[in-house]
Amino acid sequence: MDPNETWNQLLEAYYDSDSERVIELSEAMLRWLRRGGFGPGLVVGSPDGSTLVEMASSFDTRAISESVARNLLADANKRISAR
């Protein structure tokens, strides 16, 4: 699995409100991380997009990506249940 590609697709699916895809990708990311896979490269930006900072490779992005994937998964499940 390519965690960077999965991460980008996960964020796109969330942005597009594609709950089924969010669930699929969140579960894939969480499985990958539980099995000891490395976290995706993360870029932090300002709301206007003018400032982007890539987290250093020495920074463990696993905890952040796991937390976000869990939250997006829970949100997607709520959206599907509300239908």
Image (tube, rainbow, N blue to C red):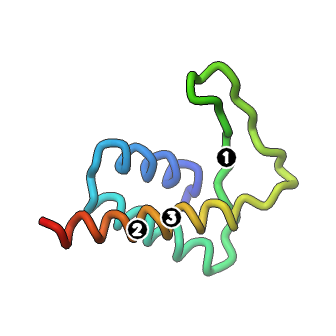
Which residue is at the front of the view, 2 or 63?
63
Q: Which image quadrant is residue 40 in? A: bottom right
Label 2 close to label 3 by CB (< 8 Å): yes
Q: Which residue is mark 3?
A: 69
- Marks 1/3: CA distance? 13 Å
Vertical comparison of 38 with 50: above or below: below
Question: Of helix, strand and loop, which one carries label 2?
Answer: helix
- What residue is at 35 percent from the left and 59 percent from the top? 22
* Nearest to N terminus: mark 2 or mark 1: 1
Q: Which residue is mark 1?
A: 42
- What residue is at 64 percent from the left and 29 percent from the top? 46
- What residue is at 30 percent from the left and 43 percent from the top? 16
Which residue is at the front of the view, 12 or 75?
75
- Marks 2/1: CA distance? 19 Å
The quadrant the N terminus occupies is bottom right
Question: Of helix, strand and loop, which one carries label 1?
Answer: loop
Q: Which image quadrant is residue 78 in? A: bottom left
In the picture, measured across the screen, residue 19 lies left or right of residue 71, that is: left
Label 3 Cα neighbours within 10 Å, binned few <14 / some 14-19 / many ≥20:
many
Label 1 close to label 3 by CB (< 8 Å): no
Give the image location of residue 69, x and y in percent. Answer: 50, 64
Which amino acid lies under the numbered mark 1 shown in the image of this protein? Leu
Q: Which mark is residue 73?
A: 2
Which amino acid lies under the numbered mark 3 shown in the image of this protein? Ala
Label 2 close to label 1 by CB (< 8 Å): no
